[in-house]
Amino acid sequence: MSNNIYAEALTQAIAQARLAVDEGGMPFGAALVVDGEIVSLGRNRQIPDSDYFAHAEVKALTDHVKKPYAKEAGAVLVATEAPCIMCCGTALVSGISKVIVGEDVHFAGGLDVLRNEGVEVEVLGNEECIAMVGDFIAEHEDRWNFFSA
């Protein structure tokens, strides 16, 4: 992650994930970068909003995307965790050209779907993201397992 804007986007996504946990949600945050500028943030709101589709990536994208980006527009989605299949689909229909992921240790998500569709994927193995999700699972197993029951 050589570009400082992406490092800042991950920092803001992590802050969103921590806010999501404080609000009773899951530890996931996202940021949308367009033309080298952070244009939107999102955090997981599934549990607090009783909205199964209120994922961080979807929130970041729907708050800003009004029509699909052309792949060459360079819209980049930065997420603390590997996106699920639904969020990958949302990124695809939004025209996202690259997805940067803090970690995929706790959840592999649909990264192969993105790769198969020509989206550039970068997994950082970010220690802060890994620790945040690991700590969350240890402290809030009920929330982590909420949707798998």
Image (cartoon, helix red, strand yellow):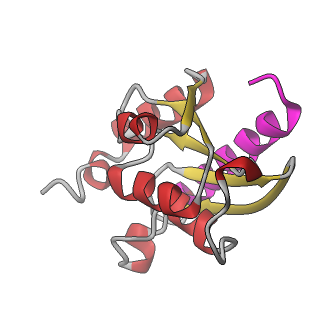
Q: Is residue 31 magenta?
A: no
Q: Is residue 118 above or below residue 128?
A: below
What quarter of the picture does the N terminus occupy? top right
For the point 67% across and 58% down, the residue is 70
Q: Is residue 16 above or below residue 110?
A: below
For the point 53% across and 35% down, the residue is 132
The reply, left or right, for residue 132 in relation to residue 107 is right
Q: In the depicted view, which residue is nearer to us: 139 or 66?
A: 66
- Give the extent of the magenta segment: 1-21
Q: Is residue 71 above or below residue 119?
A: below
Residue 104 occupies quadrant: top left
For the point 32% across and 55% down, the residue is 143
User: Which SS type dominates the magenta stretch?
Assistant: helix
Q: In the depicted view, which residue is nearer to us: 57 or 25?
A: 57
The reply, left or right, for residue 28 in relation to residue 144 is right
Q: Is residue 90 above or below residue 1?
A: below
Residue 122 occupies quadrant: top right
**Number of numbered discs present?**
0
What quarter of the picture does the C terminus occupy? bottom left
For the point 75% across and 40% down, the residue is 11
Where's residue 126, x and y in %? 60, 24
Where's residue 21, x and y in %? 52, 55
Where's residue 102, x and y in %? 58, 32
The reply, left or right, for residue 106 in relation to residue 15 is left
Where's residue 141, x and y in %? 28, 45
Residue 97 occupies quadrant: top right
In the image as oriented, which residue stretches furthest toward the left?
149
